[in-house]
Structure formats: C-alpha cells, structure tokens
Image (tube, rainbow, N blue to C red):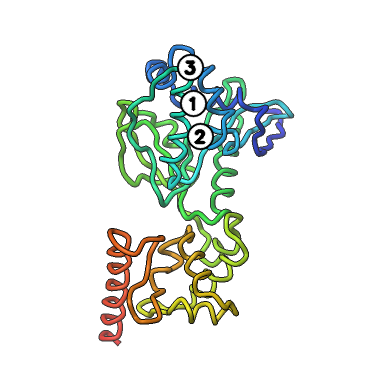
Amino acid sequence: MESRNIIVRRATIRDAGIIAQAVAIAIGDQKALKDYCGEDYMTTLSHIVRAKNTQYSWQQALIAEVDGVTAGAVVGYDGARLHALREGTFTVLRNIIGRTPSITDETEAGEYYLDSIAVLPQFRGQGVGSRLIETFCKMAFCDGHAHVGLIVDSINTKAERLYSSLGFKRVGTRQFFGHTMWHLQRTTDLDIHQRVELSTHITPFQRKVYIELLNTAEGETITYGELARRIGCRSAQAIGQALKRNPFAPDVPCHRVIASNGTIGGYNGKRDGEAIERKRTLLEAEKRIKKIDHTQI
C-alpha cells in the first residue's frame, strides 16, 4: 500500500464543517441527532462548533490531514467542565431550535473526555483514527491529566477493539442516547511530578506551590504559611488561591494543607459542607494508613 503522510494539527474556526461532520458521524443515530439538534442538525452542529465554550467548539478539536487533505477530527475536553460547556451548547440550541434536550452526563471530573471522533470514509483503514487518538491522549497527558475517557456502544466491538489496542480499558457502563455504552479509560504513564511540570494550564506560581507540596509526606500536614515560606512567598492567601485552583487534586495533596491555628482550613474553595468532609476523610484515611505501616514496621 502506498505510504501516506498523516499529520494532526490544532483546529481553526475554518474547520467547523469537518468537526460538525465528525460529531454527526460519531453520534451516528439520525433520530438522536434530530432530537438533539432539530431537523437540520448539520446546520445546528456547525453553529455549536463555531461558538466558544461549547462541547463541540473548534477550540477543543484536532484535525487529521492525509497528504494535505482533511481526513478526520476529534473533539474533547476536561470532564470537570461538562456542565459549563453543555450550558454553552444549550444556549446555541435555544437560540436556533427553541429548546434543549434532556441528556445524561457522559463524563465527569477526573478524566479528559474524548467526546467525538470520526474519519471520513475514503480515509478509513489508513491509521488516521489511531493517529488522532494517540495525539489527543498525548495532548491530554502533557497538559497534566491522568486519564483520558470515552464511551463506546456496547455492541460496537470493532471500535472497542481499536480503543483496547491503544491502551483503553473498561471502567464501567453508562446509558447515553438510549444506548448502553462501555466507559473506557486510558491512564498516563507520567508520574504526578511530570504531569505538574508539563502542564500548560497552570501558572509558574501554581507549579512552584504544587511541586513543593508534593514533598509533604502522606499522613503529614503543613500550614498555608509554612508552605508559603518554603517557596519564598510572603502571602498565605496566595497559597490558598493556588490550592483552590489545583487541577491535580488529590494527587497534588492540597488536603494536607491546614490553617495556622490547627483547624482544617478550606478545600476546593469551600470552608464547610461536602468539600470539607471530603478533606477530612482524605486526611483521616492517610493517618490510618500511616499508623498501620508504622505498626507493621
């Protein structure tokens, strides 16, 4: 077979047509497309793709080219942003078709979600899909994410075999558009230090805080002030803001940072409720593990 030159690049707004086509191919079910986007679903999808801060925005897409010709696309995003991006999508839908669909969550915080991928028919069987997926995963991992997730129809064994060959494994099931889907994930080989160092989504100050915090041992705690002193910062409040924005929790253990008076402090920008209970649970679990390890020694 003739060798083809496959490249993958960041999308531009001029790629809106191929991205919309990829999303439609990925969904596949015409009834679901019409329920979601109306009768003229391709036009609606194109508007969603051209908008910013939507699930299918061109800003979150990669394009594959074969010998300079557009061959396919993949679009995805941080699962923690699902509801915000969905609201952006719904705003477009309300403006165009006057309604929004009822839809279950297909992802969540803790994974970078591969929402839609498709290769145009004339380019299939040439390794384009694999190249798109590998590039997408590399981008996600180099931005500091630990997991890339996706869902695939439980009867689509061919697609699941492709994902499995690229390192994805079943982690559960989801119901989506009336179908039972396998939830698959691929986990990075990078350790947490490498993820923090490589991330392009944090500031140099955040990186400094997180790297220093990683030196705090499991079962130990540190105050905001002490963490500030260790990195030569005069503001415990600045440390608190960096921890509030920590995208690597709990791998970067901001739950180990407490107030100077010995109280538990905040967590995820909250000072009470579920977030604080989560922090308390993490600390207590680490202390129990440390106590057990000490006993065994």
**Amino acid type, callout 2:** Thr
Element on which disc 2 rests: loop
Disc 2 vs disc 1: Cβ atoms closer than 8 Å? yes
Disc 2 vs disc 3: Cβ atoms closer than 8 Å? no
Element on which disc 3 rests: helix
Foreground: disc 2 or disc 3: 2
Distance of mark 1 from mark 3, alpha carbons? 12 Å
Which mark identifies residue 54?
2
Q: Which is more toward the observer, 107 or 59?
A: 59
**Amino acid type, callout 3:** Tyr
Compared with residue 18, is residue 267 higher up or lower down, i.e. above or below?
Answer: below
Task: State which quadrant residue 2 falls in.
Answer: top right
Residue 4: give x, y in percent of width and height: 70, 31
Which mark identifies residue 92?
1
Where, quadrant-wise, is the C terminus in this rendering?
A: bottom left
Q: Residue at x 42, y 36 (%)?
A: 160
Structural crowding at the residue carrying mark 2, measured as other residues with C-alpha within 10 Å and reported as few (<14), some (14–19) or many (≥20) = many
